[in-house]
Image: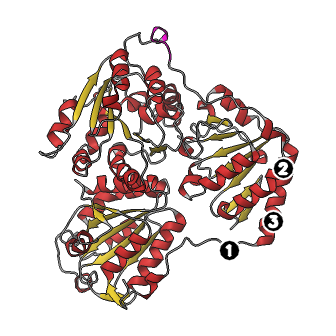
Amino acid sequence: MSSETVTVGAYLLERLRQLGVKSLFGVPGDFNLGFLDLVEDHPDIDWVGNCNELNAAYAADGYARVNKKSIGAILTTFGVGELSAINGIAGSFSEMVPIVHIAGVPSVSQQKNKPMLHHTLGDGRFDAYLKASQQFTISQADIKDNITAGSEIDRVLTDCITSARPVYIMLPTDIAYAKTSSAALSTPLKPTAPEVDTAVQGFVLDEIEKLVEAAGSEVIILVDACAIRHGVEEETWELIKRTGFPVYSAPMGKTAVPEGYEKYGGIYVGSLSHPEIKEKVESAKLILAVGSLKSDFNTGNFTYRIPQVSTVELHSDHTRVQYALYPNVGFKELLPKLTARLHPLESPSGAVSVPPFVANVPAPADDPLGADVISQLWFWPRLGKFFEPEDVIVTETGTSSFGALAIPLPRDSIYVSQILWGSIGYATGSMLGAALAQREIGLKGRTILFTGDGSLQLTVQELSTVMRKGLNPIIFVLNNSGYTIERHLHGRERKYNDIVNWKWTSLLDVLAPADLNPPPKSYTVHTKNELDALLKDESFAHAKGIQLVEVMMDKYDAPLALLRQAELSGKTNKYVGDYV
């Protein structure tokens, strides 16, 4: 990279390498094959190669969530490939996950002359897919020449790491190998920080300090998704430790705070919260909310009972103190200064004890479903005892994501779940990216996936890529005969919520490479004793190869939080009512 010029493709790959990307997901197609030659020959970036583009987008999302100092990257071909990926890209936009979507597209001359090429709509609209991507990405680069290619790449990648949202790059076949200046590569890309008015920032700090002093022993911290997405977990943790304030998290903020910390009280999710957590949060005189994201499933269907007058909201690009909004006062700069202000105060809130966040395993005899049946009530606390530090736990939309919320996770573990976008099938593709990132950054824990039988049928192909890449996750398939979350939302007895019951323990053998060593292992457990014995088996808990566990469950059984959420959602989305 020391020469004065490089190919545009090489320039783009060098920028990805500088941003920490070591795995590129996607599917080959004739408009990206030339660029793929550069990828395959690159010494530091591995071409993963997925079964389809949707799974590739999910994998890039999971990769970026676990490797928080990098971004996810996906490469597709023009039209058919990129449209297949859009659902996954939209999920990353919704949940603020930084992804770059690179689309190999026809040459600049073809785009200009508009021949009826394959993968087009047949009507000369070569910009249709760009227009579609504009709805789901924060920034786009329609590269037309090699002279401006580098600056365009830098612009959108800077937008990606600044906004923590996906961006889109069109890379024409003839531009990928055209030469461009390499001079800018000596300057690493950095997020664009908001222009801070120090006087306004100082005033905000004064106001927060006054509110903390006035609240006395009733100050808490509530951590949410954007603290993770915008990279202020360390700054938030310093504030928590230095002040000693009780701390809670929203569902999308799970594992932003060590859940074994003595002042961590658990998950606040509005009316779905444990009564003790609900009372502590909603009765606080002051809530310092870091990175809140108030979606329906993240707030218990908008049942937060937190007065604005009692709230300070800290965001990436603004701060809200009670009813006053302060643009450009972002938490990356504000949090360290706030910690310095509040630490010497020795607020009475720092001495308040917090009931520990625990999940006790109920005795089998106390289970309403029976002593032998594997119930949701028993399953999640029992799995909580199985988790270890640095595990990456991926849960699917439905019973898994709701069940895992109530379980404290060990230190340095990472929780991955798509709570806002909620695309079923996401977790399996995401697990691939999460496992690769976990291996790259050196986390010593395991990758553990929880998914439903219905969800897994959408994206099951990607288990073959997982095995091809030598990954060894533990996959728990909750076999409850279909779409349990949908049954509780609507159509409890309807056939559309049923699925074909696959031979789940044969899946890995079918999808595995012929020479996989060690070979995959699969199990079916029907009772608590069977699952308990498996979890205690050291050869299972720390196996060198991939494993799948089919967990037989009642098709109507669901975590209590899901039942409550379904009841609230059912009222909101009712299909029968009085209309004027």
The residue nearer to you, when weighing 292 against 217, is 217
Binning the other alpha carbons within 10 Å of mark 2 as few (below 14), some (14 to 19) or many (20 upward) gives: many
Inter-mark Cα distance, 2 to 3: 14 Å
Q: Please tell me whether residue 364 belongs to the stretch shown in magenta.
A: yes
> What stretch of residues is rendered in magenta?
362-366
At mark 1, the secondary structure is loop
Q: Which residue is mark 3?
A: 202
Say if residue 173 shows up in the picture.
Answer: yes
| Residue 392 position (above or below residue 89) | above
Tell me the residue at 33%/68% (across/down): 44
Q: Residue furthest left?
A: 514
Q: Horizontally, is 273 left or right of 60 in the view?
A: right
Q: Position of residue 405 (x, y in %)?
A: 51, 35
Tell me the residue at 24%/50% (across/down): 465
Q: Which residue is mark 2?
A: 211
Q: Amino acid at mark 3?
A: Gly
Tag of residue 195: 1
At mark 3, the secondary structure is helix
Q: Horizontally, is 121 left or right of 189 in the view?
A: left
